Amino acid sequence: MNPILITATDESTGKTAVALALALVARERGRSVGYMKPKGTRLQSAVGKTLDEDPLVAREVLGLDAGMADLEPVVYSRTFVEQVMRGREDPAALRDRIRDRYDALSADHDLMVVEGGGSFATGGVAGLTDADVADLLDARAVLVARYEDPTDADAVLSAARHLGDRLAGVLFNAVPDAALDGLRADAIPFLEGEGIPVFGAIPRVRELAGVTVADLASELGGRVLTTDAPTDAFVERFTVGAMSADDALTQFRRTRDAAVITGGDRPEIHSAALDAPGIKCLVLTGGFEPPGAVLGRAEEAGVPVVLVQSDTITTVERCEDVVRSGRARDARTVERMRELLTDGADVDRMLALSG
């Protein structure tokens, strides 16, 4: 049995959803499926420990009872990288740890789905890039990539050179409708002419592309100040209100499905955002509540207002992570990805990689 390694050109490509959806398809076909993410990269605090969100979701979706130390043998944090650089982590011992945990997990399954960490290059300081892990576990790699315009082929070619013979093919995910024709007519034939197989192209769908305002508020630890404005609208991007009101209105009118992040003490920016139809919510920083007139206008416009205590820079960093990663991290959205994968990709060819 060869494990299938799901890697990606960059972060936030939908790698986790693809990995778990492929595992679900295999399980529906009668296979016993295990999961592992050797490098934990999506870190959060959980019960006093630093854990990756992805194995937690995998354990729920696939009904696994393995411990987190087995599913995630290396916590790839900033502190870990510093320890490696200072010679306090032994790369050979790390590889042995991953191999041992993999052997224990795979003993109970006839297919293992291994998820890469971050992008295909993450882990280089410890000799644990996805290509290194593929060599260690004798895995075939599926590269998940985005495609919005022809220049995105550069990232695929770069990853292909890095992965070498371990690369089995590419799966394009979250492709906008406007880019599908160009991808199929030009990019896919070009890549296949370069010896890079393509498993398919999954279109972009809203429920996997962003987060609801309610989820965003929860992730930020924010308080929704409005009472009647609905919080089920999807936010797919954010913009920062750090300019004059006139400039802000011009910028806000150019965007869509966005959250505006600005200080709670900038009512002129709040008003400009409420005049722009593409703004789905206001995220106000610094713990400053806006004037009552702003909240009244927000209620009338149906635009929720979320108040957070953190400063604007910190909030922008957190929003970027939340909005880019989307919400493909529960059973419902993984099931939606399973449907898309079955319709848009050559799943038989992907599963055949395991031998």
Image (cartoon, rainbow, N blue to C red):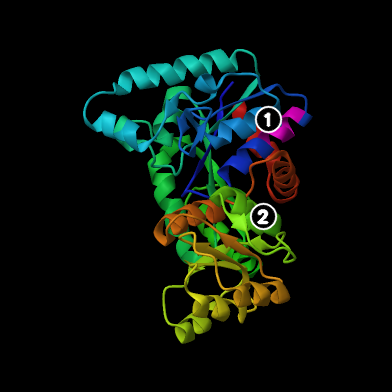
- Image location of residue 347, percent across then percent down: 69, 40
Q: Report if the CB atoms under discs 2 and 1 are less than 8 Å apart.
A: no
Q: Could you tell me residue 212's position as x and y percent?
A: 66, 57
Decide which of 206, 149 is in the foreground and name it. 206
Q: Distance between the residues labelled 2 and 1?
A: 22 Å
- Tell me the amino acid under the disc marked 1: Glu
Of 301 and 91, nearer the camera is 301
Residue 13 seen in render: no
Residue 340 locus on image (x, y percent): 72, 49
Q: Name the residue under label 1.
A: 60
The answer to whether residue 262 is seen in the rendering is yes
| Quadrant of image for the C terminus | top right
Specify start and end residues of the magenta stretch as a single range.
22-27
Magenta-drawn stretch, dominant element (helix, strand or loop) = helix
Residue 78 sits inside the magenta stretch: no
Viewed as shown, does residue 189 lie left or right of 203?
Answer: left
**Number of other residues with Cα within 10 Å of mark 2, as a class: few under 14, some 14 to 19, many 20 or more:** some
**Which numbered mark, 2 or 1, is in the foreground of this view?**
2
For mark 1, give the secondary structure: helix
- Amino acid type of disc 2? Ala
User: Mark 2 falls on what kind of element?
Assistant: helix
Q: Is residue 85 left or right of residue 3?
A: left
Which residue is drawn at the image coordinates 50% and 17% (left, top)?
Answer: 101
> Which quadrant of the view contains residue 226?
bottom right
- Mark 2 sits on what residue? 214
Depicted 319 relative to depicted 4: above or below = below
Height in image: 353 above or below 182?
above
